[in-house]
Image (tube, helix red, strand yellow):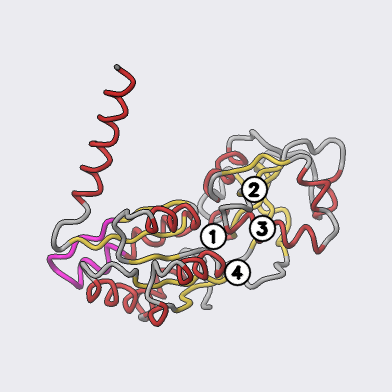
Amino acid sequence: MSCKRSLLALSLALSAVWGAAAHAGDLVVSAAASLTNAFKEVAQGYEKEHAGTKVILNFGASDVLLQQIVKGAPADVFASADQKAMDKAVEEKAVKAASRVDFAANQIVLIVPTDSKANITTLKDLTRDDVKRIAYGNPASVPVGRYTQGALQAAGLWDAVQAKSVLAQNVRQSLDYVSRGEVDAGFVFATDAAIMPDKVKVAVRVPSQTPVTYPIAVTARETAAKEAASFVAYVMSPAGQEILSRYGFQKP
């Protein structure tokens, strides 16, 4: 019985959180984990220009965010780290296809702890016996994992690296694994590596088979559709693009 009470309490707590996010004047933005630092500042900039609007940010792996939206979690804007997740959003009619636009680009990098003695300078070095644990996002749900898999398959190294994999739930978890020295190396976006220069260093800039571009769209929820379109416009504006640039994002 206590277990049932705990589950009920958790359900009520989650409902309260999402309910709070649905108040008039609130704009809920679900964005890829790699956008965390940049979008926090983007939200602040938007709020300064739109008095009375509170931007509520929800970060996570793009596929996980999409599933939340599909299952009814409130979200007015969806920003993905790859096109595949946004394609799914369009297929599920979770976003308004006409509002979809690419707003940023990134690059995949292989990072190691700053104090690493492994001397990893190429992707092939990952196959060495002394390199035992390699972190990257789960390709089934994390865009950086899909980019990583594509690059390693193109290099003929996927099977060897996969055998040493430590799967992360999102790109920031992969970054954390490397920063704490829990793995020998890890794949992240260049913008993620840039936020921890004292703990990780870039060993290899990885050529991606698919351009690393970020799409954003207004969701199908009508509660704050006009405000959502306004937020997307701000992200695309010179002010929004300048913020993204400062965090290392490139123009799409």
Q: Where is residue 248 in the image (x, y as percent from the top left)?
A: 51, 66
Q: Nearer the viewer, mark 4 or mark 1?
A: 4
Q: Nearer the viewer, mark 3 or mark 2?
A: 2
The residue wearing badge 4 is: 212
Callout 1 amino acid: Thr
Which label's residue is closer to the chain start, 3 or 1?
3
Q: Give the Cα distance between marks 4 and 1.
A: 12 Å
Q: Give the Cα distance between marks 3 and 2.
A: 11 Å
Whether residue 55 is in magenta: the answer is yes
Which label's residue is closer to the chain start, 1 or 2?
2
Q: Position of residue 247 (x, y in %)?
A: 47, 63
Callout 2 amino acid: Tyr
Element type where label 1 sits in the image: helix
Q: Nearer the viewer, mark 3 or mark 4?
A: 4
Residue 109: assigned label: 3
Give the magenta part as a residue range: 43-56
Q: Give the Cα distance between marks 1 and 2.
A: 15 Å
